[in-house]
Amino acid sequence: MKHIILFAFFLFTTSIAMAENKKEKVIFIDNFNNAESIPNPKVWKLCDFFKCAWAQHFEHVKGYENVRVEDGFLKLKANKVDGQYKNGGIRTIKGFDKNTRVEVRAMLTKRARGTFPAIWQMPIGGKPWPKSGEVDIMEWVQGTPMEFYQTVHTYYINGDEGSAGVTNPNRDPNFDVTQFHVYAAERTENAVIFYVDGKETFRYENMHLSKDKMQFPFCDYKFDIILNCSLGGTLNGNRTWPGEIHDEDLPVEMWVDWVKVVKCKK
């Protein structure tokens, strides 16, 4: 009986050790449970104004007025105040290496027309866009209100003039962005692989072409994490892809429960 008990104990402890070995190696996590009303300034910084579709409405944002940490969530707001449209957005100060997976649990408070919420990654210190790549983990636009997009951009895809990347071809036609979902993407040396709620949705393969083709730059740089709830409208008199802003739909928020970065399993 003693031998049986010892053997059972051995199996039990071995199974625990194996489970521990299979655990993810978490290299970054933010649950937004801090006591402060703003995200950790040692980790995150505010998005800047640029004259482009997603960033133009940061121009009139003052500090953290559209970014707050509340009730365990990061809340990013897009609104209109005194005739000015305003975005909410932050990005990590540091980037993350290849062979990592970014996971973000998030939802929208409503499907506000003209909104352009996104969870994405850009290379730090990279070449002019899109030569060093872009990874869009989640994007939503009013033209397809019951869908969302996961996309990659490279120079190989876009060239000098193009703006459309390669996106998930088999999108769920009845996806509810107003419910919490876990959006994820991992950058490995063989592919950028996208997930929703733990299920793989799309992958962009490394074709192992010569470097000058710029087909797969996703392992050449550290990539940051950007979280934004932006507004589209017009830019330089032209309509942007998020479409016309409907003031009656504002304000709208993107709530982020947590952000996690793990080392990809070999």
Image: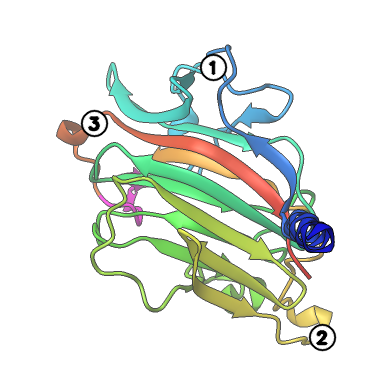
Hey, what amino acid is under mark 2? Answer: Ser
The answer, for residue 87, to whether it is visible in the render is yes
> Is disc 1 surrounded by few (<14), some (14 to 19) or many (20+) residues within 10 Å?
few
Location of residue 39 in the rendering, given as x and y in whole percent from the top left corner: 59, 23
- What label does residue 210 carry, if any? 2
**Against 22, is 94 above or below?**
above
Q: Most prominent secondary structure in the magenta stretch?
A: loop
Q: Amino acid at mark 3?
A: Leu
Residue 231's image quarter?
Answer: top left
- Mark 1: which amino acid? Gly
SS label for mark 1:
loop
Residue 164 location in percent, x, y?
A: 47, 70
- Does residue 195 show up magenta in the picture? no
- Could you tell which of marks 2 and 3 lies nearer the N-terminus? 2
Q: Residue at x 72, y 55 (%)?
A: 23
Q: With 261 as the anchor, is 59 left or right in this view?
A: left
* Left or right placement of residue 93 versus residue 143 in this view: right
Q: Is residue 236 magenta?
A: yes
Examine the rendering and report whether any part of residue 52 can be seen.
no
Q: Secondary structure at mark 2?
A: loop
Q: Which range of residues does the magenta coloring cover?
A: 233-243
Q: Nearer the viewer, residue 240 or 262?
A: 262
Q: Residues within 10 Å of mark 3 (few under 14, many from 20)?
A: some
Q: Give the mark count.
A: 3
Q: Which residue is mark 3?
A: 250
147 lies left or right of 119: left
Report the residue marked by disc 1.
63
Query: Neighbour class for label 2 at 10 Å: few (<14), some, many (≥20)?
Result: few
